[in-house]
Amino acid sequence: MPSPGPHHRHDGDGWVACSFGDAEHRHWGLYGAAGLLLARRSPGGVVSDVVLQHRALWSHHGGTWGIPGGALAAGEDAVTGALRESAEEAGIAAGLVRVVGRHVLDHGVWRYTTVVAEVRDGVDLQPAVTDLESLDVRWVSVRKTDRLPLLPAFATALPGLLALLEAPSRPGA
Ligand SMILES: [Zn+2]
Protein backbone atom coordinates (compact mmCIF):
# COMPACT_ATOMS: atom_id res chain seq x y z
CA MET A 1 0.00 0.00 0.00
CA PRO A 2 1.16 3.56 -0.49
CA SER A 3 2.51 5.33 2.53
CA PRO A 4 3.03 8.96 3.37
CA GLY A 5 6.25 10.70 2.55
CA PRO A 6 9.12 10.97 4.98
CA HIS A 7 7.78 14.10 6.63
CA HIS A 8 5.39 14.40 9.53
CA ARG A 9 5.11 10.72 10.45
CA HIS A 10 3.39 9.98 13.75
CA ASP A 11 1.92 7.17 15.83
CA GLY A 12 -1.45 7.27 14.09
CA ASP A 13 -0.02 6.31 10.71
CA GLY A 14 -1.30 2.93 9.54
CA TRP A 15 -4.19 1.20 7.86
CA VAL A 16 -7.42 0.09 9.55
CA ALA A 17 -9.77 -2.52 8.10
CA CYS A 18 -13.50 -2.05 8.64
CA SER A 19 -16.52 -3.99 7.45
CA PHE A 20 -19.06 -1.24 6.96
CA GLY A 21 -22.07 -2.62 5.15
CA ASP A 22 -21.10 -5.63 3.07
CA ALA A 23 -17.84 -4.20 1.82
CA GLU A 24 -14.32 -4.59 3.08
CA HIS A 25 -12.67 -1.23 3.45
CA ARG A 26 -9.19 -0.15 4.32
CA HIS A 27 -8.76 3.31 5.78
CA TRP A 28 -5.76 5.43 6.65
CA GLY A 29 -5.34 6.33 10.34
CA LEU A 30 -5.14 3.99 13.32
CA TYR A 31 -7.04 6.54 15.43
CA GLY A 32 -9.20 7.79 12.59
CA ALA A 33 -8.51 10.69 10.29
CA ALA A 34 -9.59 14.27 9.78
CA GLY A 35 -9.44 16.94 7.13
CA LEU A 36 -10.13 20.64 6.78
CA LEU A 37 -12.64 22.11 4.36
CA LEU A 38 -11.69 25.78 4.39
CA ALA A 39 -13.93 28.33 2.69
CA ARG A 40 -13.82 32.04 2.02
CA ARG A 41 -16.61 34.44 1.20
CA SER A 42 -17.09 37.06 -1.47
CA PRO A 43 -17.43 40.68 -0.33
CA GLY A 44 -21.17 40.06 -0.42
CA GLY A 45 -20.86 37.29 2.17
CA VAL A 46 -21.51 34.37 -0.15
CA VAL A 47 -19.25 31.32 0.13
CA SER A 48 -17.19 31.66 -3.03
CA ASP A 49 -14.15 29.37 -2.84
CA VAL A 50 -12.78 26.37 -0.99
CA VAL A 51 -9.21 25.16 -0.56
CA LEU A 52 -8.64 21.95 -2.45
CA GLN A 53 -5.61 19.71 -2.55
CA HIS A 54 -4.47 17.84 -5.64
CA ARG A 55 -3.32 14.61 -4.06
CA ALA A 56 0.14 13.25 -4.79
CA LEU A 57 0.11 10.37 -7.25
CA TRP A 58 1.50 7.86 -4.75
CA SER A 59 -1.28 8.53 -2.25
CA HIS A 60 -4.59 6.68 -1.85
CA HIS A 61 -6.76 7.85 -4.80
CA GLY A 62 -3.68 9.70 -6.03
CA GLY A 63 -4.27 12.37 -8.64
CA THR A 64 -7.75 13.23 -7.40
CA TRP A 65 -8.65 16.45 -5.58
CA GLY A 66 -9.70 16.53 -1.97
CA ILE A 67 -8.93 18.50 1.15
CA PRO A 68 -5.83 18.68 3.34
CA GLY A 69 -5.98 16.08 6.07
CA GLY A 70 -4.64 12.82 7.38
CA ALA A 71 -4.35 10.40 10.25
CA LEU A 72 -5.00 11.56 13.78
CA ALA A 73 -2.31 11.01 16.41
CA ALA A 74 -3.10 9.10 19.61
CA GLY A 75 -5.32 11.20 21.85
CA GLU A 76 -5.66 13.97 19.29
CA ASP A 77 -9.12 15.44 18.73
CA ALA A 78 -10.36 15.83 15.17
CA VAL A 79 -10.25 19.64 15.08
CA THR A 80 -6.68 19.72 16.34
CA GLY A 81 -5.67 17.03 13.88
CA ALA A 82 -7.35 18.68 10.90
CA LEU A 83 -5.70 22.02 11.67
CA ARG A 84 -2.31 20.35 12.20
CA GLU A 85 -2.54 18.50 8.90
CA SER A 86 -3.66 21.58 7.00
CA ALA A 87 -0.72 23.53 8.43
CA GLU A 88 1.70 20.75 7.45
CA GLU A 89 0.30 20.13 3.98
CA ALA A 90 -1.08 23.48 2.90
CA GLY A 91 0.58 26.16 5.00
CA ILE A 92 -2.75 27.14 6.55
CA ALA A 93 -2.16 28.84 9.91
CA ALA A 94 -4.78 27.70 12.42
CA GLY A 95 -5.06 31.18 13.88
CA LEU A 96 -6.34 32.57 10.58
CA VAL A 97 -9.40 30.35 10.38
CA ARG A 98 -12.63 29.97 12.32
CA VAL A 99 -14.16 26.50 12.72
CA VAL A 100 -17.88 26.55 12.00
CA GLY A 101 -18.84 22.88 12.03
CA ARG A 102 -17.86 19.31 11.46
CA HIS A 103 -19.17 16.22 9.73
CA VAL A 104 -18.30 12.69 10.79
CA LEU A 105 -18.20 9.70 8.47
CA ASP A 106 -18.55 6.83 10.93
CA HIS A 107 -17.33 3.37 9.94
CA GLY A 108 -17.37 1.95 13.44
CA VAL A 109 -13.73 1.16 14.14
CA TRP A 110 -12.69 4.08 11.94
CA ARG A 111 -14.02 7.61 11.58
CA TYR A 112 -13.24 10.49 9.27
CA THR A 113 -14.12 13.95 10.53
CA THR A 114 -14.34 16.83 8.10
CA VAL A 115 -13.79 20.06 9.98
CA VAL A 116 -15.50 22.94 8.20
CA ALA A 117 -13.97 26.37 8.65
CA GLU A 118 -13.81 29.77 7.06
CA VAL A 119 -11.13 32.39 6.82
CA ARG A 120 -11.37 35.02 9.52
CA ASP A 121 -12.64 38.43 8.45
CA GLY A 122 -10.01 40.65 6.86
CA VAL A 123 -7.46 37.86 6.39
CA ASP A 124 -5.96 37.22 2.96
CA LEU A 125 -5.02 33.56 3.29
CA GLN A 126 -3.10 31.93 0.45
CA PRO A 127 -2.60 28.18 0.80
CA ALA A 128 0.54 26.59 -0.63
CA VAL A 129 2.12 23.21 -1.16
CA THR A 130 4.29 22.67 1.92
CA ASP A 131 5.07 18.96 1.85
CA LEU A 132 5.15 15.92 -0.43
CA GLU A 133 1.48 15.00 -0.08
CA SER A 134 0.23 17.47 -2.65
CA LEU A 135 0.75 18.28 -6.31
CA ASP A 136 -1.15 21.51 -5.78
CA VAL A 137 -3.15 23.30 -3.11
CA ARG A 138 -5.29 26.26 -4.06
CA TRP A 139 -8.54 28.13 -3.83
CA VAL A 140 -11.14 26.67 -6.18
CA SER A 141 -14.43 28.39 -7.01
CA VAL A 142 -17.32 26.50 -5.43
CA ARG A 143 -19.06 26.62 -8.82
CA LYS A 144 -16.13 24.88 -10.50
CA THR A 145 -15.42 22.04 -8.09
CA ASP A 146 -17.38 19.64 -10.29
CA ARG A 147 -14.90 20.22 -13.13
CA LEU A 148 -12.15 18.51 -11.12
CA PRO A 149 -11.76 14.77 -10.53
CA LEU A 150 -12.70 14.78 -6.86
CA LEU A 151 -11.89 12.07 -4.34
CA PRO A 152 -15.10 9.98 -4.52
CA ALA A 153 -15.98 10.19 -0.83
CA PHE A 154 -15.33 13.93 -0.83
CA ALA A 155 -17.52 14.48 -3.89
CA THR A 156 -20.35 12.69 -2.10
CA ALA A 157 -19.92 14.74 1.08
CA LEU A 158 -19.34 18.17 -0.45
CA PRO A 159 -22.96 19.42 -0.77
CA GLY A 160 -23.63 18.65 2.88
CA LEU A 161 -20.37 20.27 3.95
CA LEU A 162 -21.17 23.45 2.04
CA ALA A 163 -24.58 23.51 3.72
CA LEU A 164 -22.82 23.68 7.10
CA LEU A 165 -21.23 26.93 5.93
CA GLU A 166 -24.55 28.45 5.00
CA ALA A 167 -26.25 27.78 8.31
CA PRO A 168 -24.39 30.30 10.52
CA SER A 169 -25.01 33.20 8.14
CA ARG A 170 -28.78 32.83 8.20
CA PRO A 171 -30.50 35.41 10.38
CA GLY A 172 -31.68 33.82 13.55
CA ALA A 173 -29.84 30.57 12.91
ZN1 LIG B 1 -15.03 1.60 6.04
Image (tube, grey):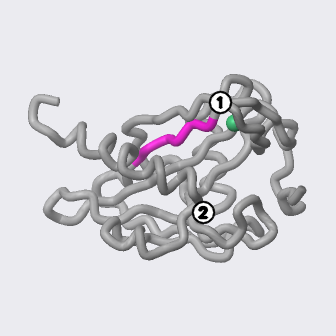
Q: Main secondary structure of the magenta part?
A: strand
Q: What kind of element bears circle 1?
A: loop
Q: Position of residue 173 (x, y in %)?
A: 17, 30
Q: Quadrant of residue 5?
A: bottom right
What residue sits 56% from the left and 34% below the top?
Answer: 105
Name the residue type under label 2.
Gly
Q: Nearer the viewer, mark 1 or mark 2?
A: 1
Q: Which residue is mark 1?
A: 21
Q: Which residue is mark 2?
A: 91
Mark 2: few/some/many CA within 10 Å (<14, 14-19, 20+): some
What residue sits 46% from the left and 35% below the top?
Answer: 102
Q: Nearer the viewer, residue 147 or 13?
A: 147
Mark 1: few/some/many CA within 10 Å (<14, 14-19, 20+): few
* Label 1 – label 2 distance at C-alpha: 37 Å
What residue sits 41% from the left and 69% below the top?
Answer: 146
**Magenta stretch contains residue 115:** yes
Q: Does the numbered disc 2 mark a residue whose Cβ is under 8 Å from ligand 1?
A: no
What residue span does the magenta drawing correspond to? Answer: 112-117
Name the residue type under label 1.
Gly
| Lower sequence index among marks 1 and 2 | 1
Q: Quadrant of residue 128?
A: bottom right
Q: Is residue 107 left or right of residue 11?
A: left
